[in-house]
Every structure is written in structure tokens, then in C-alpha cells.
Image: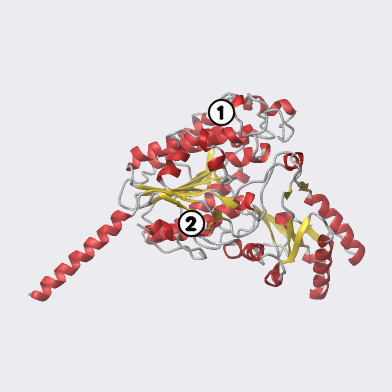
């Protein structure tokens, strides 16, 4: 009898412990990535963010990891979203760029390209022949599905396909993105055969067209944007003439179905607002966070990236889009408080990469900088190699700051080694190049350890070139000196924001260095599930100190 009583008590204790762990889990996890958000934007515009806006609410009530770094190169969108959600690096998860060269065939392919699937929600097949197939490892969202025997619901939302697909993972219930040709939210047959009725209804409502007809005026008087360069400057990349990027910006007038189409939504604050609206609809229609099984919503705000590329960080347009994003984030959090329940959801916000200052802006302020026209340099390099080896087009591309060789014209390992050595010598003589390293021998390179580690982490022998080029600070690949870009190891590209907020998250901050790859294992620890299959990161211990 005593044995039965003890057994009963033990079972009750086990059930109580299980109940506690179940209650500790949030009903919903919301992962937010702001595309091209530099860490310093949290503070550059802090005084201008609303008192109860999204950013101040997160910073004052969440846990702010002030020193979060990207630990690989190149720092591009597809790589960043993959690394955040896998806790891994390109060497392991395989996404080495937005596009990369398949070394065996020499084909340059999009990171999300998948010809085995079809578009759903549009006749524009190219926009929908995409999937997470090229991602070699699981994501934290995949692991949540596995941990719950696929009872969890996972949904991804972003204007960019790669911003939705990689975070949502392989096992997602849905991933949606914008078709620039039609303005529809679409998906691919990887996820479903037909769009849900609510998505079709939204597309038919003409919402995209209505958003496009909104003129972009600054939120506040121009004179108050003291953190940015004057509105009339030479650093911004115009659509047509200089007047096309002056306030008010009329997107309806700029619309051209054969050129930019609904892609213009990605270059306007309304792109963020539309993404936020669609994400709320996904929460309602998929009933995310309504039961005891943790669900996961991934949102990537793509518009800041397009605005950053066109206007650069020191632009009023960049400042304005963050002030408006502040309001969108507040609206989303208010919605989640009501829909899911305050302290019933866990939210984190981060970025896939930062962005460099415009090179001419740097020059005008006595700092050395320049664009790196790699297509032209590729031609120069091939001409040089042809003289020495008697063969044309030895180098396919310098994509991702790497020398990708055309193996079909190279005979044997001896010639390959000679070509690699000649390429290294070619770049070592150029003043804009800080280091040039043979990727397979990067561990031997006499370069700073932090750069060496990023090269090794970014090198995947099947999808990365033989040689990695590291440019001097403030030099970057760009087809024009207007606007800006990203992709390097430097802090302006690699120092990103990271704030955790909501259920189980203490208020506070830390300046201890952590990495993008620490996000997924931290979530795994908070959710009591396994970390992704290629994860190299570690849980951020500060979040677990009570």
C-alpha cells in the first residue's frame, strides 16, 4: 500500500513538473528580422522613437544583447536569415550567398531556387519556384515541429521569398511572400497546392494597389531630421532623375509593370505596414497561439533593406522608415497583447546584416572609401589569366567577394594550383584589397583571427569559390557609387541588434559579445526543445539568470 502511495505521489510530482514546463513555454514565438538594420539605429533615432512605440518598449522591457555580431562572411540576406534560424554558418548550412556558384557545374543559382516546385497564387512561375531545399540543416522552427510531433503551427511572412522561406524552415505550415508582378501574396507547392481562401480574398481586395497609391511624405517636418544628411544630396540613387527621390515620392507615378512593378512596395514604409497587416491576418487565420502547443510566426521586414540600398544610412528616408517601423512594431505588439495575451508570447528582434555608409559621403567627410566594380575587374582578371595560360573565361564570377573558377577549362590539379596562385598574386597587388586568402588554406593565413574565423565559417567547398577577397574598410562591391550595400566582415555590416522580449524574459542588457548563431540555441533552451542539427551557437546565459 505504501508502495502504491509513493508511486502515486511520484506520478503526481512528475505531472506537476511537466505542467510547470508546459506553462513556461509561450503560446507563440514571434521572430522578427529587420533587413539591413544596423545596431546603432536603436540609438541613433532613440530620442525620436515614440514613448510607447515598438523600439522603446522592446529596449526598456526586454533583454538587449548590445554586442551581437555576425561570425561569417559574406553578410547577405539569405545567409543571415539561414544563420539566425539554424544557429549555424554557411560552411555547414550551405547558404553561402543570396546567389552562389555550384562549384561542380559552374552554375550561378539563387539560394532559394527549386525547379521541382511550382508557384501557387500567381502565373509568374519564376516567383514561386522556390523552397528551403538548398538549406542543409534544420531550423529552430523545424525543431519545434519535430518536438511537438508537428502539432505546432509555423508560418513565415516577408516581402522577400528568402526572408520568409529560410526562417519558416522545411516543415512549415506556410510561407508567404510578395509577387512583384501581380502584387499578390504567394507561396510555392512546397507548402500547399492552393492559397488559403483568406489569402486569395486579400489579394483580390486590391490592397497592394491601394498601398502603392500612397505618397511617401516625411512623418515629421524635414527640419527635424537632424540625424541625417540634407534632403537634397548626391548620395541617393534616383529612379529616373533627381526629382524622383525627393519628397513627396509618388510611387503610383513611378509604377512600371515591365520594370519595377509592385516591387516598389519594398522601397517604401508601406511595405512594412503591409507586411505587419498580413502577419496579423496569419495569426488570426492560422489561430496561432490559441492552444497549449507553442506556435511560431516569423516576420522579416524587407523594406529597410531596399531603402538602405537606394538611399544609404545617412538619409532622411532611412531615418523616416525606422520612425514608421517603430509604429508598425507597436501596432503588432498591441495586437499580440490582445490576440495572444500579454506575457503569453515570446518575441525577438534582430537583423540579417547591417549596411555601410555611402562611399561618396565618406569621402566628403575625409574618410577613404570607394565602390568595387567586380564585374569590370572580373574581365580584367580574365584577360590577365588568358595571357598567362592561353585560355578564355577562367574565372566565372567574383560573386560574394570570391574567385569562382571555371573548372571546365582547367586541366588537372597542377594547373588549378598555378591559376589560384596567379589570382592571389593579382589581388595582392591591388591597393583596395586588404587580404586575399585561398579558402581551403584559410587556417594557415597570417591574418587577424576574427577575420580568419569568418572566412572559415563562410566557406562551403561545394558552393563557395577557391579564393576569398577581403577589401579595405569602406570598400564594397557595388554597380554604382550611389546608395550603399553590405556583405563584408566589418562592424557596420556585422554588428546587429538583438532584443528578446515577453514570456520568461528578464529586463536588462549585456555588452558581452554574442553571435547571430546563438539565437537559435537560446530559443531551444527557452522552449525546452532540441537545437537545430547544424547548430554551433550557445544559449545566451544572461537570459537565464533570475
Q: Which residue is drawn at 30% across and 51% down?
A: 292
- On residue 519, the disc is 2
In this view of the protein, which residue sits in the foreground, 162 or 67?
Answer: 67
Where is residue 64 shown, x and y percent of the image? 47, 49
Residue 463 locus on image (x, y percent): 66, 62
Residue 435 seen in the current view: yes
Q: Residue at x 29, y 57 (%)?
A: 22
Cα distance in 3D space between marks 1 and 2: 36 Å
Left or right, 230 with reference to 169:
right
On screen, residue 360 above or below 134: above
- x then y, percent, for residue 294: 36, 52
Q: What is the secondary structure assignment of the residue under circle 2?
A: helix
Answer with left or right where residue 427 lies relative to residue 202.
right
Q: Name the residue under label 1.
A: 209
400 lies above or below 40: below
Name the element at disc 1: helix
Count of marks placed on residues: 2
- Which comes sooner in the sequence, label 1 or label 2? 1
Residue at (83, 57) in percent of width and height: 430
Amino acid at each position: 500500500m505504501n508502495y502504491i502511495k509513493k508511486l502515486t505521489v511520484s506520478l503526481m510530482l512528475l505531472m506537476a513538473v511537466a505542467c510547470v514546463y508546459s506553462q513556461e513555454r509561450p503560446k507563440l514565438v514571434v521572430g522578427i528580422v529587420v533587413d539591413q538594420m544596423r545596431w546603432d539605429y536603436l540609438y541613433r533615432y532613440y530620442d525620436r522613437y515614440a514613448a510607447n512605440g515598438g523600439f522603446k518598449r522592446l529596449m526598456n522591457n526586454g533583454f538587449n544583447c548590445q554586442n551581437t555580431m555576425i561570425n561569417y562572411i559574406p553578410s547577405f540576406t539569405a545567409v543571415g536569415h539561414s544563420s539566425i534560424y539554424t544557429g549555424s554558418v554557411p560552411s555547414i548550412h550551405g547558404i553561402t550567398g543570396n546567389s552562389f556558384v555550384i562549384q561542380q557545374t559552374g552554375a550561378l543559382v539563387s539560394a532559394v531556387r527549386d525547379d521541382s516546385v511550382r508557384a501557387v497564387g500567381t502565373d509568374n512561375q519564376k516567383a514561386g519556384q522556390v523552397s528551403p531545399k538548398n538549406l542543409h540543416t534544420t531550423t529552430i522552427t523545424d525543431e519545434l515541429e519535430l518536438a511537438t510531433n508537428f502539432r505546432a503551427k509555423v508560418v513565415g511572412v516577408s516581402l522577400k521569398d528568402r526572408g520568409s522561406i529560410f526562417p519558416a524552415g522545411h516543415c512549415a505550415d506556410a510561407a508567404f511572400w510578395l509577387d512583384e508582378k501581380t502584387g499578390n501574396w504567394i507561396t510555392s507547392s512546397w507548402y500547399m497546392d492552393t492559397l488559403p481562401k483568406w489569402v486569395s480574398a486579400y489579394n483580390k481586395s486590391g490592397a497592394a494597389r491601394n498601398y502603392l497609391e500612397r505618397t511617401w511624405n516625411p512623418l515629421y517636418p524635414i527640419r527635424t531630421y537632424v540625424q541625417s544628411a540634407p534632403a537634397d544630396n548626391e548620395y541617393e540613387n534616383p529612379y529616373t532623375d533627381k526629382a524622383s527621390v525627393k519628397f513627396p515620392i509618388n510611387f503610383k507615378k513611378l509604377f512600371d509593370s515591365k520594370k519595377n512593378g509592385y516591387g516598389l512596395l519594398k522601397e517604401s514604409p508601406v511595405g512594412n505596414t503591409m507586411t505587419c497587416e498580413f502577419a496579423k491576418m496569419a495569426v488570426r487565420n492560422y489561430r496561432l497561439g490559441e492552444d497549449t502547443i507553442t506556435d511560431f510566426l516569423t516576420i522579416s521586414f524587407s523594406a529597410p533593406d531596399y531603402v538602405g540600398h537606394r538611399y544609404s544610412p545617412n538619409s532622411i528616408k532611412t531615418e523616416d522608415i525606422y520612425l514608421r517601423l517603430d509604429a508598425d512594431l507597436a501596432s503588432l505588439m498591441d495586437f499580440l497583447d490582445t490576440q495572444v495575451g500579454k506575457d503569453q508570447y515570446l518575441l525577438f528582434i534582430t537583423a540579417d546584416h547591417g549596411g555601410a555608409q555611402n562611399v561618396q559621403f565618406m569621402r566628403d567627410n575625409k574618410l577613404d572609401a570607394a565602390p568595387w566594380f567586380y564585374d569590370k575587374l572580373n574581365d580584367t582578371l580574365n584577360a590577365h589569366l588568358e595571357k598567362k595560360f592561353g585560355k578564355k573565361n577562367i574565372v566565372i564570377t567574383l560573386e560574394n567577394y570570391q574567385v569562382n573558377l571555371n573548372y571546365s577549362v582547367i586541366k588537372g590539379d597542377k594547373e588549378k594550383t598555378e591559376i589560384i596562385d596567379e589570382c592571389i598574386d593579382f589581388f595582392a597587388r591591388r591597393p583596395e584589397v586588404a587580404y586575399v586568402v585561398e579558402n581551403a588554406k584559410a587556417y594557415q593565413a597570417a591574418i587577424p583571427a576574427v577575420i580568419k574565423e569568418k572566412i572559415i565559417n563562410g566557406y562551403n567547398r561545394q558552393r563557395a569559390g577557391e579564393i576569398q577577397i577581403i577589401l579595405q574598410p569602406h570598400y564594397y562591391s557595388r554597380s554604382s557609387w550611389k546608395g550603399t550595400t553590405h556583405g563584408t566582415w566589418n562592424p557596420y555590416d556585422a554588428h546587429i541588434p538583438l532584443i528578446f522580449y515577453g514570456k520568461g524574459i528578464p529586463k536588462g542588457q549585456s555588452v558581452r559579445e554574442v553571435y547571430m548563431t546563438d539565437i537559435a540555441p537560446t530559443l531551444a533552451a527557452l522552449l525546452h526543445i532540441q537545437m537545430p542539427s547544424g547548430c554551433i551557437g550557445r544559449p545566451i546565459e544572461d537570459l537565464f539568470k533570475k
